Image: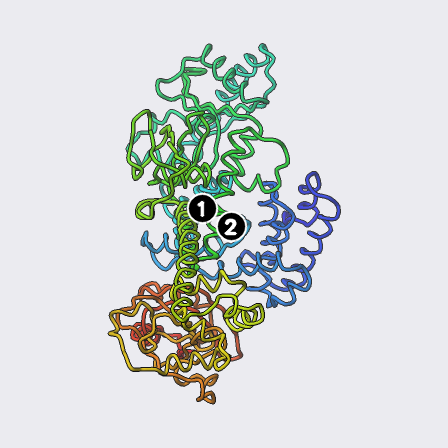
Amino acid sequence: MNTEPKLEDLLEKLRPNLSEKDLEDIKKSYLFAYEKHKGNYRLTKEPYITHPLNVALILSDLNVDKTTIMGALLHEVINNAETTEEELEQTFGHEITCIVKSISTINKLELPDDKESSAIYLRKVLVGLAEDVRVLFIKLADRLHNMRTIWAVNPEKQKKKANETMNVLIPIAHRLGIYSIKSELEDLCLKYLKPDVYEDILKQLDATIPELEDVLEAMQDSISEILMEHGIKFQIKSRVKSVYSIYKKLSKGKKWNEIYDILALRVIVEKESDCYLTIGLIHSKFHPLPKRFKDYIAMPKENMYQSLHTGVFGIDGKIFEIQVRTHEMDEIAEKGIASHWSYKEQGTKKIQNIMEQKLEIFRNIIDSYKETTSDLDFAANVNADILGDLIYVFTPRGDVVELPKGSTPIDFAYRIHSKVGDTTVGAIVNDEIVPLSYELHDNDVIKINTNKNSTPSKEWLDFVKTTAAKSKIKSYFSKQDRTDYILNGKNILDRELRKQKLSFNEVFSEEKLAKILKDLKMQDIEDIYLAIGSFRYTANYIIRLTTEEKQNVTDALIEKVSNKNKVLPKTNNKNDIIVGEYNDILVTLAKCCKPVKGDNIIGYITKGEGITVHKADCPNVLDKTERLIAVSWNDNGDNEYYTDIFIETLNDKNYVTDIINKASTKNINVVALTTTDNAEETIYNLTIKVKNVTILNDFLDSLYSLGFVKKVGKK
């Protein structure tokens, strides 16, 4: 009997929630993938198309959007069907292409060993590469189907994939709140990591399942009768606890007969108030276990899970775990954040509040990413603010606020509102005054004291935890510094004009001002004040640009840096690059050759952009001798620099993970990675960050220790 899924199975599951146009787009993506995978088979002997189709079917249970389903169907066409990104973009557009591209990159990553640090690193990289959270949904569903069919691979690979799933992917499923996938993955991992333990638990369960099912049915009937008597609309589900959850209890030292919650019932009601009424009615008939009642409605878990939990002595004196929740709470419990992607109904206020906070956290991290320099910094922020340990605290009105563990009252204040954070002067936690650096804990009630005349302190940056708070504090001081620089620059310019007995209106006539702004690529007179106040240019330099005899900004700069009567010691220089005695010249590193500290360098005087520093042998400046100037590295600088390298390898397999692991052992940040496949080799193009050319060369030399590397070099 053929049990392979069909496209129609998927369309039927999606039809209640999607339009016919959406279904046509999904059908188009399926047919595209079908043609691309035609003739290819999995190790299970099934046609390859069954894998992406099963991944889409898993995701269809989560109420995800059309784009996620299409991405699932297409997620292997780049890696396993030789489809180009250009072809994909022309056929399905940019959004789908970005999702498939991210999945293709992520699927090349593997956990190199069993170390916890490796798992954390891979989790960070994975999350960092998943710019769209839907990529993570697809990756989890992809792994679930692969784990369901992992019996087809050798035992060594079974264990490796199970270990990677347990340490890298299950924590992500937990944080996203996708319980249905998380629970099945846990059971499958246990099956392959500890087969004897798994089989032993199954045997003990199987020995009692007929009896347990009879007791569950009787308990279900009894609770149903109580609820119907009181006119409560409900659904009720029963289950025997999962193998993995029983294993966790046993591994903590409990004996089989001490595991009280093997039998579980879930009651789903219409309203939040019905949840509490239902628990009360159950407790009135069945004696509750002490200290087993948990209210996750008032205080949701970190993954937005809400429910009431209790344990009772039920039918035949057996102990039952009972959960009571609304339909939406059940949706979130099973499907997590994925269910919100297309969820249209009004939710409870608390859930909307938590969801908005999560989305706001994502937005803040993405905003801060625009200002940061490293993709791995971004991944670290996501790991800390989204996937790290979380706490739940309260406003004085009882509103729930979600924060990363280790957060302070300042983090709390900025989560409430930027203005609250900026004007914070004190904090009261649980009716006690605490320092602003105080570490908050679960269930704390925080009151923030503000003063409209107060401003942030730079010292806050030493202890705040959240990306949002750091970003907003830095933003405040950036704006404040700009204001101060502008005022300072105006004063300096006014003094210099008086010293030279010049009139502002004469020096900065409309025509002359327009020319300076154009030459210096500035917007208005405030930009000139800012440049002077921040010591980018001197006031005298700006004035000289307006004089008849020195109209050319490039000539003025050449004259300026050519005057070498005085040379300051390097220790006084605040720039990475030293240009004679001058601290007030804009210096940038050329993007064409990306010099690294220690490279031989030369300066090129540009029009309006100061000096651009190139490698001495950069072809872009070899024929421009009239504007070249000697520059040198500041020995006291400690910054990191971007540079591009290539790694030429054998093309017998994918080596992305090996390369990233080698970079990690050398503390090299890999910012971007692309591949080019030729007939005889694969070329990996990397953008990395290093402190100097010595560290760079050491890393390049170390790559030759990888047996598959044929050639490496700087680009």
Pointer 1 residue: 172
Q: Amino acid at mark 2?
A: Leu
In the structure shown, which secondary structural element does the residue marked by tag 2 occupy? helix
Residue 551 versus residue 79: which sits nearer the camera? 551
Q: Position of residue 499 (x, y in %)?
A: 38, 68
Q: Position of residue 249 (x, y in %)?
A: 34, 33
The answer to whether residue 651 of the structure is visible from this angle is yes
Question: Around disc 1, counting alpha carbons within 10 Å, would you say few (fewer than 14), some (14 to 19), or many (20 or more)?
Answer: many
The numbered mark, 2 or 1, whose residue comes first in the sequence reads 2
Q: Is residue 108 above or below residue 229?
A: below
The residue at 48%/35% (across/down) is: 304
Task: Please identify the quarter of the rendering in which residue 634 is found.
Answer: bottom left
* Label ID, residue 136: 2
The answer to whether residue 211 of the structure is visible from this angle is no
The residue at 41%/77% (across/down) is: 613
Q: Is residue 297 above or below residue 616?
A: above
Q: Amino acid at mark 1?
A: Ile
Question: Around disc 2, counting alpha carbons within 10 Å, would you say few (fewer than 14), some (14 to 19), or many (20 or more)?
Answer: many
Residue 145 versus residue 90: which sits nearer the camera? 90
In the structure shown, which secondary structural element does the residue marked by tag 1 occupy? helix
Tell me if label 2 and label 1 are in contact, CB under 8 Å.
Answer: yes
